[in-house]
Image: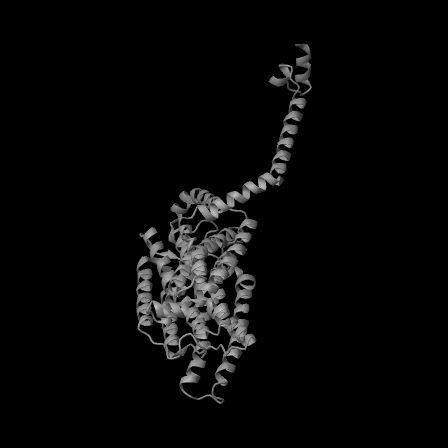
Amino acid sequence: MTGAADKAELGFEEDDDMAAGTPPPARKMQSLDFEHIGSLAAVAESLSPRSKWRMALRSIRIVIFQAKINVLLPFGPLAITLHYLSGNHQGWVFLFSLVGITPLAERLGYATEQLACYTGPTIGGLLNATFGNATEMIISIYALKNGMIRVVQQSLLGSILSNMLLVLGCAFFAGGLAHPNRDQVFNKASAVVNSGLLLMAVLGLMFPAVLHFTHSEAHYGKSEVSLSRFSSCIMLVAYASYLFFQLKSQRSLYSPIGESAQGKGNKPIHALSLQACLSTEIDEEEESTEDEEDEKEIAQGEAISWLFVLTIWISILSGYLVDAIQGASESLNMPLAFISVILLPIVGNAAEHASAIMFAMKNKLDITLGVAIGSSTQISMFVIPFCVVIGWMMGEEMDLNFQLFETATLFITVLVVAFMLQEGTSNYFKGLMLILCYLIVAASFFVHVDPKSTGDNK
């Protein structure tokens, strides 16, 4: 007792463990050793081959077996098998290739979304647009290699129309039904810049067509191609400048509206009262953290690997799809323009459909616009000029003369969408109007007869 009193006077306190005869330093050292050993064991387990195989099997289960749409995957090998069988199976090869590419395009969009979780919303929208257009670009290169210039032009035009009317319309409609009591808000500045780029693309496509149909070419048959190649180079420079402007120079101005206005969550500050903001601030932060954890289902390296594998498989099926287009048009008694403008883009835009609708229902309209409108901008300002340059290298006279009917359709579509986006808000009624506009466009191409010979060079 005297020793304990002396220790108390000197400022030392005796805890319960010391009184029980257990020296704290020894116990603390043991716990630290166990923690250290446990962390080393976890690192060793993560680096072991068995753990790598387990992660690979988990990734295959999530990407391949978790999605119900993957029941359509066997149609791809079936299309390849029918291609090598004797007999006239071009119609079935086309349909099976079309169905087989659909789940691949959707899984390509899923892998891109997983990669976007690690890169942020701005770059994520760009990645969704880029890899979402991989299907269209691959199909276009195969068709261009076979000299099917009109198929290339019409499929790329159909991708723009599908993204701007059908994909964006379905996203607005689904987002409006998921949030029926108020309008959804997105970054108006980014939408205006994309609309301006789309109008510039219309300008680049319009002058070769006007030059051709007014018969005012200085050198008939050559001025049109020369103007297209010059305009394509200018459009590629404009798109590169746009990327630098959005991602580097003025990045803060085009960040998602939830981040720029509030710093967390997806709701703009002006849409909520101060009392509501104070009462829901903690809940929104927890929900956003849970959403981020739920969205990251595969690792970043796994997402990149799946992008590589899926792109190769889509490239293989695209070759068989392009080879069967002409025979499918004859066997199915369906206009080639309708197949190129409507059917091919719907399959190619499966990734945009899935991701745009998902983000709209989660009230992430800025990523939705980055996927839908950003994809249309990328096709019009990058993919189409890129195909012109590639055709130039191949010796094919690919140009920007998309004929009068197609050019007028694109011009009116850009105007309609630009008016829809000018307020910076969306609801289910705007989405319904865009969907109905796309149905009118689809019906128009079903009764449209291409003035050029179908499937041949221009």
Foreground pick, 172 / 409: 409
Could you say which quadrant of the image residue 210 lies in? bottom left
| Image coordinates for residue 238, horizontal then vertical, percent | 53, 71
Residue 272 versus residue 431 in the image, above or below: above
**What is the x, y in percent for residue 354?**
41, 55
Q: Residue furthest front?
A: 86
Q: How many marks?
A: 0
Task: Tell which of 444 and 248 is nearer to you.
Answer: 444
In x, y percent, where is residue 148?
A: 46, 73
**Colouring rule applied to residues:** one colour
- Residue placed most toward the observer, 263 or 72: 72
Say if 31 sits above or below 107 in the image.
above
Q: Using residue 27 as the reference point, say whether residue 269 is left or right of it.
A: left
**Residue that sits furthest to the top in the current view:** 1
The N terminus lies in quadrant: top right
On the rendered image, what quadrant is the C terminus found in? bottom left
Q: Give me the residue at 65% from left, 29% from top.
A: 32
The answer to which of 432 and 12 lies nearer the viewer is 432
In the rendered image, is residue 349 in sight? no
Residue 119: x percent and y percent? 54, 53
Q: Is residue 328 visible?
A: yes
